[in-house]
Amino acid sequence: MSVTVRSTPNIALIKYWGNKNNELRLCAAGSTSMTLNTPSVDVTIDHAETLAVTSRNKEMKERDIARFEKTLQLTKNYLSSLGYDDALPASLNISIESGIPPSIGLASSSAVFSALAKAISELIDADLTDEQISVMARLGSGSAARSIFGGFGAIRTADGEGIDSSVGWQIADEHHWPLHDIIIVPSTDEKKIGSTEGHAKAQSSPHFADRIKAIEKYRLQDCIDAILQKDFEKLQAVAEEDCMDMHECMQTQNPALHYLSEETFRIIGEVKELRESEHLPVLYTMDAGPTVHLFCTNEARERVAAFAHAQASCTIFEATVGPGSHIV
């Protein structure tokens, strides 16, 4: 019996960058995000004698297959710790159909691995909570833990390095606050160094410890409060501060990662001018890539979308709050 699950990216407002355990993708600090309604990925799984991973949109290289193989092994370990020793079959046939360009800062891996985790939870005979499914998703991609949930998600961290010491949870569902994400993609070229490799080197930045302290001291809670209170001005301040702080960490780690392009900075500058001149509730944020995410309220959506579509040679996506991973 095959299972198909659809999932979408989540875009971080307080960023996840760096691990306290790279193998288990245990996050160094908490994070928050909004799950989008589009673009999406469908992942279909079924029992198999040997692992097979195919994608209609991307050539699966040896390292890609190895990532899935490692994720499945860690998932089996986690299920065993919950008392489900033989729940997962010997291996899986995994088929991916994605509408998300890979490796451009659009969180394609968070969509893929959240869909995989949700599909596994449906395939096996186990009564799992969404938070437990989020742990399985995190084993493949740290940020995938948040895409299990619709609306606004987060990751909380606990002391120690237990496999479940970084867990996704839901701040508010998709009906809470109808924000939009207008996405400007200056380049669809795949980045040379992926997030997984970057996370592993994050602690080499002299700025890393201060960043973690700031998140734990005030940023994480400020962001959660802004979401719950629907306070866009507060959300803008903390999200933009954390975004640029993460990129400073990236740029000062070894080797340095410069994901933002000249086009990224040009767009940011123009957004600031637009925000000031027209008093628009819009904020910018970027993940590990040159792509600019413009979060805005209903009242600003039309103007922000017009600004985005006027950007020459850019690919544009328009998204709003999504429902999280679900069976199709």
Image (spheres, grey):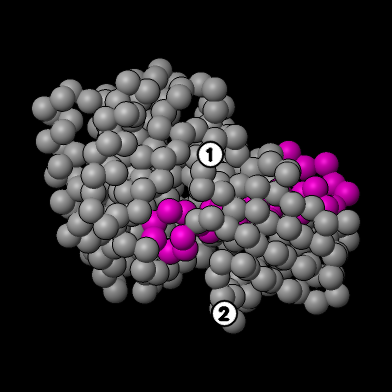
Left or right for 195, reference 166:
left
Residues rendered magenta in the picture: 101-129
Q: Name the amino acid, label 2.
A: Lys
Q: Mark 2 and mark 1 in contact (Cβ < 8 Å)?
A: no
Q: Name the amino acid, label 1.
A: Asn
Q: Quadrant of the N terminus?
A: bottom right
* Residue 153 locus on image (x, y percent): 52, 36
Magenta stretch holds residue 173: no
The image quarter containing residue 301 is: top left
Q: Quadrant of the C terminus?
A: top right
Element marked by disc 2: loop
Q: CA distance from mark 1 to mark 2?
A: 28 Å
The image quarter containing residue 187 is: bottom left
Left or right for 261, reference 51:
left
Q: Is residue 5 above or below residue 228?
A: below
| Mark 1 crowd level (few <14, some 14–19, many ≥20, 10 Å Cα) | many
- Residue at the top extreme of this rendering: 229
Mark positioned earlier in the residue sequence (1 or 2): 1
Left or right for 71, reference 180:
right
Residue for point 25% across, 65% down? 258
* Residue 145 locus on image (x, y percent): 57, 47
Magenta stretch holds residue 107: yes
The residue at which mark 2 appears reads as: 61
- Front in this rendered view, residue 162 or 320: 320
Residue for point 15% across, 51% down? 266
Residue for point 35% across, 25% down? 297
The residue at which mark 1 appears reads as: 37
